[in-house]
Image (tube, rainbow, N blue to C red):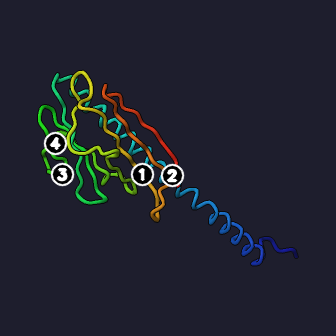
Amino acid sequence: MPTRGFTLVELMFTLVVVAILLGAAVPSIHKTILVNRLHHAAEDFRQFLLEAKSVAIQKNQPVYLNYGAWSSTEHCVGYRAGLTCYCTTAGSCDKVFTDRDYDGVSFYAGNGSSGVAAFQPYGWAPGKWTFKMQVGSNGTYERRAWIVTNKMGVINLIYTDAY
């Protein structure tokens, strides 16, 4: 009488093949997750800046942005209409964006950008800010996003690979 099913050897062989395929796919999946986190954080930050710019136009007064840090790995930007604020002080700003909300994503002001800047009802003053966001693991950053504003208040989002 013939038996139906698989032998133990066939099942073990199948499990080994599946394990090899999963082992090859995990790094790719991990990288995809990191890149998606960066895209989400960068787009949220761009929306944060667009909102600050809109508030300046709606209220016809400057909206001040403040860049700060709680530590070398935790940074924030806050804005407030009409007055400066400190994003590291609770309740000081109308709204705060922080990299604490995005696991594995860090950001900081680049090209010497720091302190306070403002969206004026007619554009950006006094110059431009550049923000760099990055994700990665084991100290090797796999993807970067640059958020750059110019003197007219145009906000650009640029992605680069960095290995």
Toward the right, the furthest residue is 1
Residue position marked by numbered label 2 in the rendering = 162
Q: Identify the residue shown where x is 28% and y is 49%.
A: 98
Locate residue 156, reporting x and y percent: 40, 33
Query: Is tag 3's residue or tag 1's residue first in the polypeptide sequence?
Result: 3
- For the residue pair 121 and 40, the one nearer the viewer reads as 121
Please state which amino acid type lies under the numbered disc 1.
Answer: Gln
Residues marked 3 and 1 touching at CB (< 8 Å)? no
Give me the C-alpha separation between circle 1 and circle 2. Answer: 9 Å
Nearer the observer, disc 1 or disc 4?
1
Which of marks 2 and 1 precedes in the sequence?
Answer: 1
Q: Residue 23 appears in which quarter of the rendering?
A: bottom right
View extreme (bottom): residue: 8
Q: Determine the CA span between mark 3 and mark 2.
A: 30 Å
The answer to which of marks 3 and 2 sits earlier in the sequence is 3
Amino acid at circle 4: Cys
Among the 4 quarters of the image, the one containing residue 73 = bottom left
Residue 48 picture location, percent across and down: 30, 37
Residue at (47%, 56%) from the top-left corner? Answer: 141
Sequence-earlier tag: 2 or 4: 4
Query: Does residue 140 sit above or below 130 in this rendering?
Result: below
Q: Which residue is mark 3?
A: 88
Q: Secondary structure at mark 2?
A: loop
The residue that disc 1 covers is 134
The amino acid marked with disc number 3 is Thr
Mark 4 surroundings: few (<14), some (14-19) or many (≥20) residues within 10 A: many
Q: How many marks?
A: 4
**To which residue does mark 4 refer?**
93
- Which corner quadrant holds the N terminus? bottom right
